[in-house]
């Protein structure tokens, strides 16, 4: 981690690699989050009777939007944070493994 703390060229490469990996992860999470809520209008179009369906006094459309979308968003956020932490930990291990090699030179 010394390379990162000192702002060396190698440290910059590690940080750039981490940021790139986190951006790819973010793109994947955003795509997954967009697909589900974006598919709700298609679902309502394909199954027009769903608009008229009520469960426990609530319209099925609200149950789909509120009951499924918001928990999915929370789950996606939790997944992103945990995966991002794993990426950071992996970077830390790689830097720590490389340091003894650099010190031996």
Image (cartoon, rainbow, N blue to C red):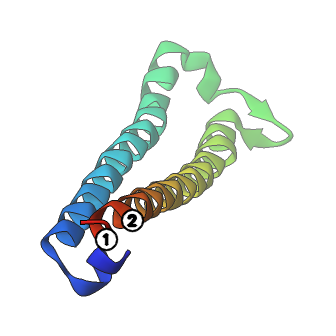
Say the numbered circle drawn on residue 8: none
Q: Relative to residue 92, is residue 59 drawn left or right?
A: right
How would you rate the neighbour count of disc 2 (Cα within 10 Å): few for under 14, some for 14-19, many for 20 or more?
few
Q: Quadrant of the N terminus?
A: bottom left
Q: Relative to residue 13, is residue 44 drawn left or right?
A: right
Q: Secondary structure at mark 2?
A: helix
Q: Are marks 1 and 2 in contact (CB under 8 Å)?
A: yes
Residue in the image at 60% along x and 56% along y:
78
User: Where residue 103 sits in the image (x, y, percent)?
Assistant: 31, 71
- Furthest-top residue in view? 46
From this view, report whether residue 67 is shown above or below residue 86: above
Residue 33: name its quadrant. Answer: top left
Residue 10: name its quadrant. Answer: bottom left
Residue in the image at 54% along x and 49% along y:
76
- Furthest-left residue in view? 9
From this view, report whether residue 28 is shown above or below residue 20: above
Q: Secondary structure at mark 1?
A: helix
User: Where residue 21 sits in the image (x, y, percent)?
Assistant: 32, 50
Q: Quadrant of the C terminus?
A: bottom left
Residue in the image at 81% along x and 34% along y:
55
How would you rate the neighbour count of disc 1 (Cα within 10 Å): few for under 14, some for 14-19, many for 20 or more?
few
Q: Relative to residue 8, is residue 99 drawn left or right?
A: right
- Furthest-bottom residue in view? 6
The residue beneath circle 2 is: 100
Q: CA–CA distance between discs 1 and 2?
A: 5 Å
The residue beneath circle 1 is: 103
- Furthest-right residue in view? 56
């Amino acid at each position: 981690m010394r390379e990162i703390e000192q702002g060396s060229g190698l440290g910059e490469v590690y940080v750039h690699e981490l940021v790139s990996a986190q951006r790819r992860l973010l793109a994947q999470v955003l795509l997954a989050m967009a697909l589900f809520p974006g598919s709700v209008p298609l679902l309502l179009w394909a199954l027009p009777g769903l608009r008229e369906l009520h469960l426990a006094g609530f319209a099925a459309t609200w149950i789909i939007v509120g009951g499924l979308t918001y928990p999915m968003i929370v789950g996606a956020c939790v997944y992103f944070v945990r995966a991002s932490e794993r990426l950071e930990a992996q970077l830390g291990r790689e830097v720590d493994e490389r340091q003894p090699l650099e010190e031996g030179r």
